[in-house]
Amino acid sequence: MLKINDGSLHEECAVFGFFNGGNVNAAQIAYQCLFSMQHRGQDGAGLAGASGNNVHLHKDTGLINEVFSKQVLDEFNKDEILVGHVRYATSSSVTMLDTQPLVMHGYEGFIAMAHNGHIVNGNEVRRELQKRGVLFQTSVDSEALMHIIAGNRDGIEAGIKDLIATVKGSYALTLMCPDKLIGVRDPWGIRPLAIGRLGDCYILASESCAFNAIGAAFIRDVKPGEIVIITSSGLQSIQTQPKKNTSLCVFEYVYFARNDSCIDSVSVYQSRIRMGRYLSKTEPVEADIVSGVPDSAIPAAIGYANESGIPYGQCLIKNSYSGRTFIQDGQLNREQSVRMKLCAIHENVENKRIVLVDDSIVRGTNSMYIVKMLRNAGAKEIHMRIASPPVRFACHFGINTPNQKNLVGSYLAPEALAKRIGADSLAYLGIEDLVAAVGNKQIGLCCGCFDGVYPMPIEDVNA
């Protein structure tokens, strides 16, 4: 299997948890929820299930429909509690061992955990645990979190409080131990986690789109620093002290989250519409058609079209089945990979002045190939409009960003970048307008990839 490096940013994963308070098919619910969050990770998936003190696990590399056959899912049908995960690996190594959930067995029974995020003092935490004699079986920082939790003899809740006090970085966690499902969100609120309900059943998920997939009701978001404990008695909340500078990753709204999700009371779709409107106000251009690069940029393109009065139309079609290829590494260059994913609609492109809206630019190579594709289809003019500021800095909290020297926004002005990719013009959405368009007033936003200002001191981050 080859993971195509398409030059875009990638999320690490999604987490899921389910407490079966009724007589429902737990496995089918898990499958549908994980499938709805497949966009957050395509390298591996896993599911751990428990009834009483008995826990079982299935995980592997690949997509959801490759990892879980009907025969495998049948083993989870009647479980009382489930924890699941889809993974995007930040390293080139994709192994079944590092795929989650992770399961440990201790004095008081089992713990299973799924993690979305990245621990910035992970090396330090790992070394301290090793000094105490802890042995590690995987290369993922998530395992260190489990050892912290399991190492507290006062119980899992006390262990989670230790984790919150000790660990620096981003994490949304779903955990289970005998008779409990637990959700945890880091005290900065960098990674999202939501609570849903289906009858007498509770669901935890990275995005509320998982609830839409099964007809569940969205209850609320887990708060920064909150520990949510779900048992047969219902839902209990333990609120630890959140950080003063709580900051959700802004890229959840720009790119990562699915359009039908709502994060911290903000509609992802509507925030993207507003990004397009702001972009049209600040960076207008005369054109015949506005179009978006599928899929996450389409709402911003619609917002741009609505604000500008220029008709919206599709200029590019995405191949929905291009997520993975079995062509061996080296046989497929980046331009060919773009062609596998996108095709121009000649009738909408030929002899047209096009405003092409994209959510972001990372290396600029994708944009160059897309512009070339539209030129070949007969476009008269192509004006790139980016619904976010230039990506200038690396992310240290769970996004796989290239080295800063490969971030084209860090060293090329818009005019020079337009010339490089072959566009007639290029302009970005300003950072103030992006923040206003999202409008997340609950916990604020981390815009570190745009302005280099992080929720915690950069010196705490491992190189």
Image: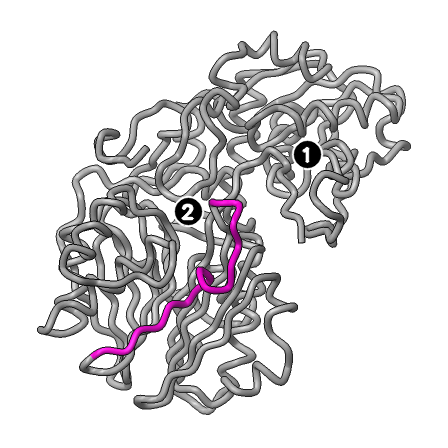
Q: Is residue 24 visible?
A: yes
Residue 270 picture location, percent across and down: 51, 43
Q: Of tags 1 and 2, which is closer to the observer?
A: 1
Q: Type of residue at label 2?
A: Val
Residue 395 picture location, percent across and down: 39, 34
Q: Which residue is mark 1?
A: 292
Q: Is residue 445 above or below residue 267?
A: above
Q: Is residue 267 above or below residue 95?
A: above
> Badge 1, how many Cα within 10 Å: few under 14, some, many 20+?
many
Q: Is residue 98 magenta?
A: yes
> Magenta part mainly helix, strand or loop?
loop
Q: Type of residue at label 1?
A: Gly
425 vs 153, left or right, is right
Kindly identify the residue that appears in the image at 68 percent across and 34 percent down.
Answer: 292
Q: Nearer the viewer, residue 144 or 364?
A: 144
Kindly identify the residue that appears in the image at 43 percent across and 64 percent down.
Answer: 100
* Image mark for residue 266: 2
Kindly identify the residue that appears in the image at 41 percent across and 47 percent down.
Answer: 266
Q: How is the image coloured?
A: one colour
435 vs 261, left or right, is left
Q: Is residue 92 magenta?
A: yes
Kindly identify the residue that appears in the image at 37 percent across and 59 percent down.
Answer: 115
The residue at the far left in this view is: 154
- Residue 404: image quadrant is top left
Name the element at disc 1: strand
Distance of mark 1 from mark 2, alpha carbons?
A: 22 Å
Q: Is residue 99 above or below residue 444?
A: below
Q: Is residue 200 visible?
A: no
Of labels 1 and 2, earlier in sequence is 2
Range shown magenta: 91-106
Name the element at disc 2: strand
> Badge 2, how many Cα within 10 Å: few under 14, some, many 20+?
some
